[in-house]
Amino acid sequence: MKPLGPIPEGYKAIDGELAIGGRKTSELVETAGRTPLFVYSKDRIASRIVSLRSAMPDRIKINYAIKANPFPALLDFIAPLVDGLDIASGGELELIRNAGIDGSRVSFAGPGKRNEELEAAIRAGVTLNLESENEARRALDIAERTGVQPRLAIRVNPDFELKGSGMKMGGGAKPFGVDAERVPELARTIIEAGCEWRGLHIFTGSQALSAEAVIETQANVLELALRLANEAGVGLPKLNMGGGFGIPYFNGDEPLDIGSVGDALGKLFKRHEQDIAQTEFFIELGRYLVGEAGVYLTRIVDRKESHGETYLVTDGGLHHQLAASGNFGTVVRRNYPLAIATRFEADPVETTNVVGCLCTPLDRLADKAHLPHAEVHDIVAVFCAGAYGASASPSAFLGQGPAAEMLI
Ligand SMILES: *Cc1c(COP(=O)(O)O)cnc(C)c1O
């Protein structure tokens, strides 16, 4: 038997079935008309943001990194609740436009921005987090040609990383950002060229659950940013400190203690009070805001035995849940939180494997999980499905197509 990850707090049953936003699973599936189905809860997103704001110092602004979940209805809902939005492609810029979000609230990071993407972003008033000197040059050329003053920040590749994070995005050679020692010169160059200077962006990693690691990194980020601005002899109007706040996915994971993070950040600001009077501070979060607000529902289409093991075969799988299958940035596969939604209150009585419908052994949703007895037609719920689910999985694989999505 292998343990399942922890189900996020607050999920209850109605008539023995998992309820989301006060509605039974079977009813949600009926409304959607099909499985597989992602259900995202407005209440959970809103209350997550409220509690995060109350933990953080007042001057911290919160950006939503839309790559975590760009579902249009969710974007419409979350945009007014956050201070800004982070995008990572021209395609995401289109989503921002379609949602009617003003470009002045948006920043655009990501390596390999094409000229057309840079131009569209500059015209929309989006802040570009420059990833290289070459990108800076191209942005300045576009600015000159179009006569639009670009809003430019520099993404720094720091010489440290966020310890214990799931995906490391800083420290050593990286395709992201400009190596710290070259930042002052680039800052002077772009300011002299007449851009609107928007400061620095330092993103060090993702999916951190240790408050201690986040606190240490935030102190390093602030110190590095102040040192670079000082060396460049420029102001620091804005600092995007990254984020990396994680959520518990696996057995033994403990939630990040954001109270401690917020307290430490408050003290850090106090220590540097003088140097940061003019600076606006942002953190950028994806999964922390929406990850636990999503549930993936998939129906069991077959139940079979093989060499003494039971397989529950569902109509979903890794084409919507690459991360839960263990194939998105994980080294060792562990089980996500998962339940038989239609028997949410039943006792676990058997050890089963829950798999997807794809013809590949990679397509697993739970290995040797202790679950209630389930039959064909029951519905399986995979939790923590609100981030990097639908948009980060290969939905075209094997011709399966995307899941339905619903915000309630
Ligand atoms: C992916 C990414 C994020 C969001 O990461 P989460 O783990 O979802 O919070 C934020 N900033 C940058 C630069 C990213 O690449």
Image (cartoon, rainbow, N blue to C red):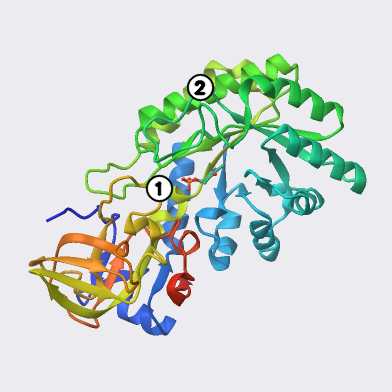
Residue drawn at the location 73% of the way across and 22% of the way down: 235
Q: Which quadrant holds residue 320?
A: bottom left
Label 1: how many residues lie within 10 Å, few (<14), some (14-19) or many (20+)? few
Q: Is mark 1 within 8 Å of ligand 1?
A: no
Residue identifier under label 2: 220
Residue drawn at the location 69% of the way across and 15% of the way down: 230
* Amino acid tagged 2: Asn
Position of residue 279 relative to residue 322, above or below, is above
User: Would you say 111 lies left or right of 400 here?
Assistant: right
For the residues marked 2 and 1, what is the alpha-carbon distance in whole angstroms?
25 Å
Q: Which mark identifies residue 262? A: none
Query: Where residue 270 appears, x then y in whole percent?
Result: 53, 20
Viewer-closest of 2 and 127: 2
Query: Where residue 387 appears, x then y in whole percent?
Result: 44, 56
Query: Does residue 408 appear anywhere in the picture?
Result: no
Label 2: how many residues lie within 10 Å, few (<14), some (14-19) or many (20+)? some
Q: Which quadrant holds residue 319?
A: bottom left
Viewer-closest of 370 and 270: 370
* Amino acid tagged 1: Gly
Secondary structure beneath label 2: helix
Position of residue 30 relative to residue 128, above or below, is below
Query: Where residue 159 appears, x then y in whole percent?
Result: 53, 23
Residue identifier under label 1: 329
Position of residue 64 relative to residue 389, above or below, is above
Quadrant (top left/top right/bottom left/bottom right) for the C terminus: bottom left
Secondary structure beneath label 1: loop
Viewer-closest of 25 and 109: 109
Residue drawn at the location 48% of the way across and 49% of the way down: 49
Position of residue 274 relative to residue 385, above or below, is above
Query: Does residue 66 appear anywhere in the picture?
Result: yes
Query: Where residue 144 appears, x then y in whole percent?
Result: 91, 41
User: Would you say 142 lies left or right of 226 here?
Assistant: right
